[in-house]
Amino acid sequence: MSAPRIPVFVMAMPEVSPKKFAIADSEAKKYKKFEMTAGSGVWCVYIERPKRERTLPQNSYYWVAVVSILGDELGYTKDEMHDEYKILFNSEKREPRKIELPNGETVTVELKPKVKSTTRLSTVEFIDYVKTCRRWAATEYGVYIPDPIKAGFNGYC
């Protein structure tokens, strides 16, 4: 697994020729500091658009429909249902660990999955997460959660 890309500086691209760009004063200072402390060698500076985080309509739909409808059906609070969804569909499984006890015996310990926050999902990732939650509610419990567009959540996508 490669290390995450961390931008050294961030710049706004004005709507001019693609070969020209501007760096805000605050970002220019970061660039100058990098330039002075980076040392010799070849450095790569990544320029990419930041991913867009989930929208307010997506968040509203998730809590009002996806979390509440199945949570009410199962007798869960909103937070309990949200946690269940995260454990099922937004977590990373972890490999069991072998631990040596003081008596020399080795035991295998199963680790709980690492549950991730949904707030860091992009708009596209969040749409996929919500689809998975809706599909699971329908197949496992026969609970229909309406489509966000049909339910009137304008600006969902």
Image: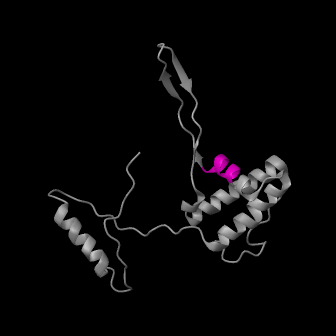
Front-lying residue, 151 or 88: 88
How many numbered marks, from 0 up? 0
Asked whether 71 or 104 is in front, the reply is 104
The quarter in which the N terminus is drawn is: top left
Q: Residue at x 57, y 62 (%)?
A: 119
Q: Position of residue 113 (x, y in %)?
A: 59, 41
User: Furthest residue to the bottom?
Assistant: 16
* Res 98 seen here: yes
Quadrant of the rendering where the C terminus is positioned: bottom right
Whether residue 86 is in magenta: the answer is yes
The colour style of the image is one colour
Residue 59 relative to residue 106: left or right: right
Q: Would residue 22 be visible to someone looking at this image?
A: no
Identify whether 47 is placed above or below 115: below
Q: Does 74 lie within the magenta span?
A: no
**Which residue appears at 38% of the width and 48% of the height?**
2
Q: Residue furthest front?
A: 102
Secondary structure mostly taken by the magenta-highlighted segment of the chain? helix
Q: Position of residue 102 (x, y in %)?
A: 47, 17
- Tell me the residue at 66%/77% (across/down): 155
Is 4 situated left or right of 96 in this image?
left
Range of magenta residues: 83-90
Name the quadrant containing residue 114. Answer: top right
Q: Residue at x 17, y 66 (%)?
A: 36
Q: Position of residue 90 (x, y in %)?
A: 61, 51
Q: Return the x and y of residue 77 as percentages of the image width and height.
A: 77, 56
